[in-house]
Amino acid sequence: MSGHNKWSTIKHKKGAADAKRSKEFSRIIKEITVAVKEGGADSEGNPRLRMAVNNAKGVNMPKDNIERAINRADKEPENLQPLVFEGYGPSGIGFVIECLSDNNNRTVSMVRSIFTKRSCSLGTNGSLSFLFVQKGVFTLTKESIAEKGLDVEALELELIEGGADEIEIGDEEVIVYTAMEDFGAMQATLDKLGITPKNAALERIPNDTKELPLDEAKKIMRMEQDFEDLDDVQNVYHNLEITEELAEALANEE
């Protein structure tokens, strides 16, 4: 899963620009809204809200913004519905797009137009589910681990006992993957250790990836960006292999 981790890291670094940060804040505010509607405004008794708040802190969202989002969701009706779209992009790359929307027709139209522009089309729900598996993905900073007096090697044993089925150790971060059903157990393990993840989410990880020549791969990444630029889109997944060459090219783009 190193390609997944590599591109996630690049996106995080490139996300410092104001427009990217605004989009990230908007995405997390929607997550907070849905979490409050489902389980109430008390993060201690609402694990989904606690995760959303932690993710907000992970992207340096101001505390006032977080509190306003919780209060607004608790007091004002907002009907956000989850939508999932699937389809093949150029070169047979599979896409899954997760959305939260208050206007389904608008969202369907915008997502379809991105496929249509590339002479591609939406598939039926579930048609690409075989390409991906849902996993828990926890991003921990080495700084937060060290603050608890732990070293990474000692932490690995705790994480494995907590349900980790893969651990990737980078220069600054540790990425922990769990089976979907072990997501809650890993949250509890990290709570016990006093470690707050920089980000935690259920993500769709490709079972197998497809490598493309650089020019074709860049077209896929531009398509991904077009989806992510839509206000209603929360997450975009695909099964393109993020090669070292592609990662370097993306990192060097402005």
Image (cartoon, rainbow, N blue to C red):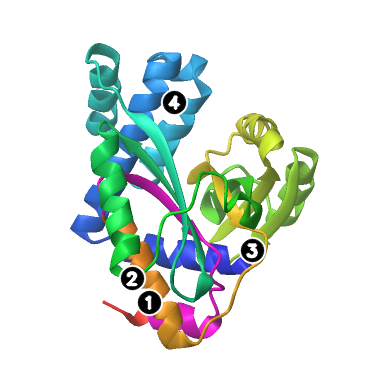
Q: Earlier in the sequence, mark 1 or mark 2?
A: 2
Q: Earlier in the sequence, mark 4 or mark 2?
A: 4
Residue occupied by mark 4: 49
Q: Secondary structure at mark 4?
A: helix
Q: For residue 15, say whether it is visible.
A: no
Between circles 3 and 2, the one closer to the viewer is 2
Residue occupied by mark 3: 1
> At 42% across and 33% down in the image, what residue appears?
52
Over which residues does the magenta segment extend?
Answer: 230-251
Amino acid identity at mark 1: Lys
Q: Is residue 76 above or below residue 220?
A: above
> At 47% across and 61% down in the image, what residue appears?
8
Residue occupied by mark 2: 118
In the displayed structure image, the side of residue 3 where residue 76 appears, left or right: left
Tell me the quadrant of the picture where the C terminus can be found.
bottom left
In the displayed structure image, the side of residue 90 where residue 64 appears, left or right: left
Query: Is residue 173 found inside the magenta-colored segment of the image?
Result: no
Between circles 1 and 2, the one closer to the viewer is 2
